[in-house]
Image: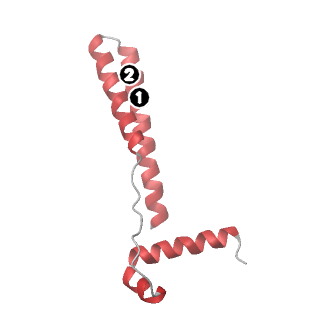
Amino acid sequence: MLSREDSRRLAELERHMWRDDPDFCMRMSGGELRAVPRRRYPVALIFTAIVIWLAAITLGVLGWWPAAILAALCGTAVFAALIARGARRGRKRA
């Protein structure tokens, strides 16, 4: 029986093979061609960053500069977390 780590690695290898050469995998499995699920950015994080940036602009227009700066920094932090998450996923795939 495979350990949990070995099972995870085997599943990852299978996903890579299906993504890189689906025809080969289909011939070897004798089954139908499976669609490899695409990874997407979390839409909620994108909308959160946009809303925070819009709040920062609104606060800046109203003259509340400290609050506008803080909101802009928070929006940038959310966006940076989103980019870091995508980069981490890309590194795992490579």
Check disc 1 and report the residue beneath it.
73
Query: Is 61 placed above or below 7 here?
Result: above
Q: Secondary structure at mark 2?
A: helix
Mark 2, residues whose alpha carbon is within 10 Å: few (<14), some, or many (≥20)? Answer: some
Residue 52 in which image quadrant: top left
Q: Residue at x 42, y 84 (%)?
A: 26
Q: Residue at x 43, y 60 (%)?
A: 90
| Residue 43 % position (x, y) | 38, 44
| Residue 82 % position (x, y) | 42, 45
| Residue 46 % position (x, y) | 37, 40
Q: Nearer the viewer, residue 91 or 28?
A: 28
Image quadrant in which the C terminus is located: bottom left
The answer to whether the residue labelled 1 contacts the one labelled 2, judged by CB atoms less than 8 Å apart, is yes
Query: Which label is found at residue 34?
Result: none
Q: Nearer the viewer, residue 55 or 64?
A: 55
Residue 53 in which image quadrant: top left
Query: Is 87 placed above or below 52 here?
Result: below
Image quadrant in which the N terminus is located: bottom right
Q: Secondary structure at mark 1?
A: helix
User: From this viewpoint, which residue is outermost toward the left?
Assistant: 61
Q: What amino acid is at disc 1?
A: Leu
Query: Is 36 placed above or below 74 here?
Result: below
Q: What amino acid is at disc 2?
A: Ile
Alpha-carbon span between mark 1 and mark 2: 6 Å
Mark 1, residues whose alpha carbon is within 10 Å: few (<14), some, or many (≥20)? Answer: some
Check disc 2 and report the residue beneath it.
69
